Image (cartoon, rainbow, N blue to C red):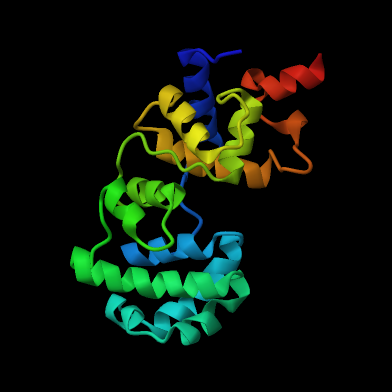
Amino acid sequence: MKKTNEQVWAIVEELKKCYPDSLCSLNYEKDYELLFSVRLAAQCTDERVNKVTPALFERFPTLQDLAEADISEVEEYIHSTGFFRAKARDIVLASQMLLREYGGKVPSNMDDLLRLPGVGRKTANLILGDVYHTPGVVVADTHCIRITGLLGLTDGTKDPAKVEKQLRAVLPPEESNDFCHRMVLHGRAVCVARRPQCQCCTLRPWCDHFTKIEE
């Protein structure tokens, strides 16, 4: 059943109460560090990425250093994140492109972000939301896709592009980026994939999944 605007706002407000600090769980100091941390987080936990990046960015402290890095050496630093060869190549090539075409700055629009090696819509949206505070961005990660489907905010599709489109249509633009961060936090704390804690979830009043299991 399609959610009303009031129900959507109720979910947004309840999440705010539960997770007032809607921060990205990846640690970074510079914009490009977030860009590369998100790339490393593909098929890897944020916790693991946060263990790897301090040494990586200490060894290559500037974008210029990363652009000039030997890809095989970058591989050594990020090996434990998986798919390290592709990730290392993307980091070095993206660093070169940022310097060559964007004056060393991470682009502030979707089209230019998507030109960077290794950057898809999820990464681009996260940069637009966290770095540039662009209204209406939706970061459709696995937690967001799964939980919004259970709630009934989307039709249950697992396609990130479709989830992004459907959430853009229902979420208040000024809340959407923080909402997605809170989905991640909720997915780790309560609505865990293999063992959702439905009985202690404060989103129960608006959750289609909970309604079905109670019937």
Can you say which quadrant of the picture contains the C terminus?
top right
Hey, which residue is sitting farthest left in the picture?
103
Regarding residue 21, the answer to whether it shows in the image is yes
Regarding residue 19, the answer to whether it shows in the image is no
Between 192 and 205, the residue placed more toward the observer is 192
Q: Is residue 127 above or below residue 12?
A: below
Can you say which quadrant of the picture contains the N terminus?
top right
Query: Residue 151 falls in which quadrant of the image?
Result: top right
Question: Which residue: 45% across, 74% down?
Answer: 89
Q: Is residue 210 left or right of residue 29?
A: right
Query: Residue 190 falls in which quadrant of the image?
Result: top right
Question: Which residue: 45% across, 82% down?
Answer: 71
Q: Is residue 142 left or right of residue 167?
A: right
Residue 14: image location, x then y, percent: 54, 28
Residue 202: image location, x then y, percent: 65, 28
Question: Which residue: 41% across, 40% down?
Answer: 177
